[in-house]
Amino acid sequence: MRFLARHSARLALPVLATVILGAALSGCGSGISLDEPIEGPVWRLVQLGNEPVAPGSDAQIQFDRNSGRVSGSGGCNRVSGSFTRSGITLRIGQLASTRMACTDPVRGANEAQFISALQTTASYRLAGPGQLALLDASGRTVATLNSASR
């Protein structure tokens, strides 16, 4: 009987270690860093799809965990709305926007594309320290943003 108890204890340790290691590694492929939540920082737009955005576009967003609201600027107009996040799933509700004219047509086009990208966001990925990629339902990157602290 003592042999069976000792043998069971020796088998339980590697099984327990495997379970703990598996649980720890399961989050590694998701791109989520528990050290850097998306809520809090101001995220500045740096890329729409595969195209870089000219510096100084002023397009940015910020997620507020407490209120479930997202707010920011499309580059010319203020935008705000609601959002929900669960794991890597991110849904941004209908956005409200001010109606100021963009004097720069390129800036206006970027703003329209940015708002469209926000509305089609289905998930996200933290692509690196201070870098947030917004993904559509097919997993394609629709916008890339850097945190303002970078």
Image: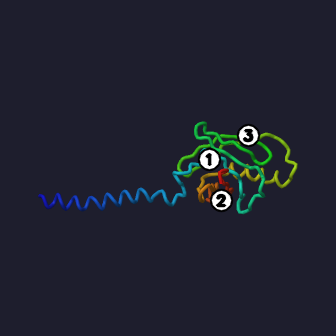
- The mark nearer the N terminus, 1 or 3, is 1
Q: Residue at x 82, y 52 (%)?
A: 107
Residue 54 in which image quadrant: bottom right
Disc 1 element: strand
Q: Nearer the viewer, residue 49 or 20?
A: 20
Mark 1 lies on residue: 91
Q: Residue at x 82, y 41 (%)?
A: 99
Q: Amino acid at mark 3?
A: Ala
Q: Is residue 89 above or below residue 139?
A: above
Q: Residue at x 17, y 57 (%)?
A: 5
For marks 1 and 3, give the CA distance. 15 Å
Mark 3 lies on residue: 96
- The mark nearer the N terminus, 3 or 2, is 3
> Could you tell me residue 69's position as x and y percent?
64, 39
Q: Quadrant of the N terminus?
A: bottom left
For marks 2 and 1, give the CA distance. 15 Å
Mark 2 lies on residue: 141
- The mark nearer the N terminus, 2 or 1, is 1
